[in-house]
């Protein structure tokens, strides 16, 4: 390493953000170069002095109560009187937040029911009853091999994004995929699949 | 509330979230604002405007940075606008010369040195002031400063180098930024 290379990374060396190998190489250069060693000491001294003097000027400062009240008052005014665009956007967000999980749950329950009946073996008697809201499958004596049915459901849910433009609101429709998955076995408790939350919260 | 909860509450226009935002970030922003503008009253106004803009822009906050980084970005923009509007010197030559004449000519007391630094910081260019404040007051690393200002690491390092040179030209002749021994804590009776 030469002095130009060292000087190019001196700030990173002083702040300790270099990789272990790079930091070691820099330290090795300092062992043989008095000029770079003085430059590092100079930078450390500068950082210490400036940091101390700058803090001396400002550490006692605190945001005035009047300013705090003014900020809070502005926030309360805004919350009390949202713009038309914000009102529409808020309404859609609340509506979507309820509809998406409800839709996914209905779809999941429908798929579970369909798959359950489609996977029934000939001659097999299956009784299903609900216990505490959970479907329990009773295994019939004729059943020989237990089967595990895996379920993966994806549903396309519409998502509206609203963007205010002047006095109007522009909305863009897109779809997001909601995935639900689960499995059940003939001799195990069937639990309703859990819906995965959306990746992008509204 | 953690950052995510705070952002969600801000977007839902929850006034209590704003109160918490101010409690958590207000004083720190004020102290940085003071470094950037050199005047406490102006710094208070800058921070007020920072929070007002943040409240208005909360819906657009993507959460890709921390809340403090987001607020600091707003403050930096407002600071630049402030300096564009206020092209005046804050430094009072007569006052500082008088104070220095009363002291040991070889040293400055810490308070005078701090005041000289504050005034010198207002005389240098906006870009130089910002890198000095971000590096030596906010203790940011080179990479963080580069991300904050949207410039390369090489540009940050270059600006730091020339910023210190420029700052030194506006400080009293015997106030050497690289020598802690030129100032001392003087015990006043």
Image (tube, coloured by chain):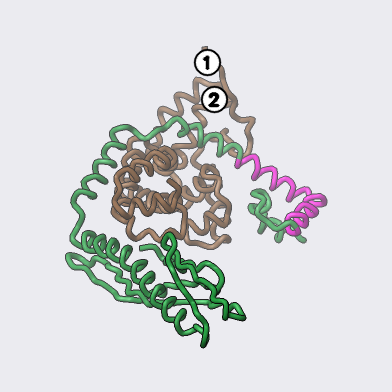
Q: Is residue B158 left or right of residue A37?
A: left
Q: Which residues are magenta?
A: A21-47
Residue A133 in which image quadrant: bottom left
Q: Name the outermost residue toward the bottom.
A: A122
Chain bearing tag 2 is B
Secondary structure beneath disc 1?
loop
Q: Mark 1 = which residue?
A: B188
Which element type, helix, strand or loop, lies under badge 2? strand
Give the chain ID for the green colour. Answer: A
Name which quarter of the figure residue A48 lies in: top right
Query: Residue B100 appears at what percent x and percent y?
Result: 50, 25
Crowdedness near tag 1: few (<14), some (14–19) or many (≥20) residues, C-alpha within 10 Å = few
Split into 4 quadrants, where in the image is the N terminus of chain B? top left
Would you say residue B125 is visible in this rendering? Answer: no
Q: Colour of chain B?
A: brown
Residue sticking out furthest to the right? A32
Give left or right: position of A83 versus A130.
left
Q: Residue furthest top?
A: B189
Could you tell me how far apart the alpha carbons at marks 1 and 2 are, in whole angstroms?
10 Å
Check disc 2 and report the residue beneath it: B109
- Whichever of callouts 1 and 2 sits on the residue coming sooner in the sequence is 2
Tag on residue A155?
Answer: none
Q: Nearer the viewer, residue A148 or A95?
A: A148
Which residue is painted at 31% across and 67% down in the image? A99
């Amino acid at each position: 390493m030469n002095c130009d290379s060292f000087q190019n990374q001196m700030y990173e060396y002083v702040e300790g953000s270099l990789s272990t190998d790079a930091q070691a190489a820099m330290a090795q250069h300092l062992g043989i170069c008095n000029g770079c060693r003085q430059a590092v000491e100079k930078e450390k001294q500068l950082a210490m002095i400036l940091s101390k003097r700058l803090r001396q000027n400002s550490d006692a400062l605190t945001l005035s109560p009047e300013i705090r009240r003014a900020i809070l008052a502005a926030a309360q005014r805004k919350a009390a009187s949202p713009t038309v665009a914000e009102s529409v956007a808020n309404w859609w967000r609340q509506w979507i937040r309820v509809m998406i999980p409800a839709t996914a749950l209905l779809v999941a329950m429908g798929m579970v029911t369909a798959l359950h009946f489609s996977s029934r073996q000939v001659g097999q008697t299956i009784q299903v009853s609900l216990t505490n809201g959970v479907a329990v499958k009773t295994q019939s004596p004729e059943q020989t091999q237990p089967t595990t049915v895996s379920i993966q459901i994806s549903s396309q849910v519409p998502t509206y994004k609203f963007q205010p433009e002047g006095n109007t609101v522009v909305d863009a429709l897109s779809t997001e995929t909601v995935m639900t998955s689960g499995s059940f076995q003939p001799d195990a408790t069937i639990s309703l699949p859990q819906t995965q939350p959306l990746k992008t919260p509204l | 509330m953690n950052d995510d909860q705070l952002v969600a509450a801000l977007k839902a226009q929850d006034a209590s979230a704003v109160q918490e935002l101010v409690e958590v970030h207000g004083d720190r922003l004020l102290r940085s604002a003071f470094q950037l503008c050199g005047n406490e009253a102006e710094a208070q106004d800058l921070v007020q405007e920072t929070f007002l803009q943040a409240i208005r822009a909360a819906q657009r906050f993507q959460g890709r940075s921390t809340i403090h980084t987001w607020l600091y970005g707003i403050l930096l923009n407002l600071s630049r606008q402030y300096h564009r509007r206020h092209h005046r010197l804050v430094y009072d030559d007569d006052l500082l010369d008088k104070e220095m004449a009363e002291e040991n000519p070889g040293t400055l007391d810490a308070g005078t040195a701090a005041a000289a630094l504050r005034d010198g910081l207002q005389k240098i260019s906006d870009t130089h002031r910002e890198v000095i404040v971000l590096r030596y007051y906010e203790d940011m690393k080179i990479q963080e400063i580069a991300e904050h200002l949207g410039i390369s690491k090489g540009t940050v390092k270059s600006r730091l180098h020339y910023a210190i040179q420029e700052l030194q030209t506006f400080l009293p002749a015997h106030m050497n930024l690289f020598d802690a021994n030129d100032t001392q804590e003087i015990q006043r009776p």
